[in-house]
Amino acid sequence: MTGRKTIKSALESMMFIWGQPLNIKDAADIFNVDKKEIYSCFKELQEEYEKEGRGVVIREINKSFQFTTRAENIGYIEQLCTPVKHKRLSQSALEVLAIVAYKQPVTRGEIESVRGIKCERVLEGLMKKSLITEVGRADAVGRPILYGTTDEFLKSFGFESLKELPPIEDIEGVMEEEISGFSSDGAYMQQISIELPEK
């Protein structure tokens, strides 16, 4: 059986190479161990990086883990990466994204009934940015598509899970908050409510 130290070392390498959030199930399958053990190893690594004040930290996103930069180093990273082109999400895109986030799974018709205007093009744009996705079909006439948010949405906003969404009455402030394109926990990543890299 693979030792815990070896697993933790391998998880570091895997996160570094993978780039995207590494799912605990995928990692558990590789080592042929229980998901709880892998989750425990990830959490230990996360604590070790935090305790040592490393330049990168390990972030949990919906039972997946990813390297991201430490908040205190944001100023240095900004200087290194400037200038960077950004494209803001439109107000209509933010409105649709908020409706999907809070009412998911939700159909286009339900979104349009809330906004009072068509939103087909907006939905297509959000899907191209991987912020929302099709999650099924509704049990209604025509079997309309149901939409929900993605892990990319969670990562971009700095949430570990949908449980961290702010109260619905605070959503306008969250959408308009000017924090220079960084997530709410200070980690270095573009925040989709403010700026989004052009694709």
Image (tube, grey):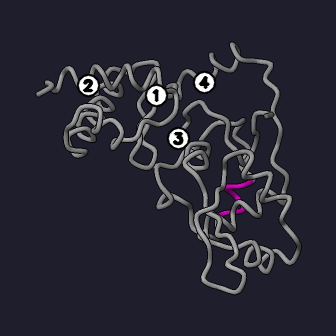
**Helix or strand or loop: what does disc 4 sit on?**
helix
Q: Name the residue rendered at 68%, 70% in the picture.
A: 145
- CA gap between label 1 and label 3 equals 14 Å
Q: Position of residue 144 (x, y in %)?
A: 70, 75
Residue mark closest to the camera, 1 vs 4 = 1
Count neighbours of disc 2 (C-alpha within 10 A) and say few if under 14, some if 14 to 19, many if 20 or more: some
Determine whether label 1 and label 4 are within 8 Å by CB: no
Image depth: mark 2 or mark 3 in front: 2
Residue 8 numbered mark, or none: 2
Quadrant (top left/top right/bottom left/bottom right) for the N terminus: top left
Spot occupied by residue 126 in the image (x, y as percentages of width and height): 75, 52
Image: 160 above or below 76 = below
The one of 21 and 59 positioned closer to us in this rendering: 21
Q: Residues within 10 Å of mark 3 (few under 14, many from 20)?
A: few
Q: Amino acid at mark 1?
A: Phe
User: In the image, is residue 127 part of the stretch drawn in magenta?
Assistant: no
Q: Which residues are magenta?
A: 171-175
Q: Dividing the picture into quarters, in which one does residue 43 lie?
A: top left
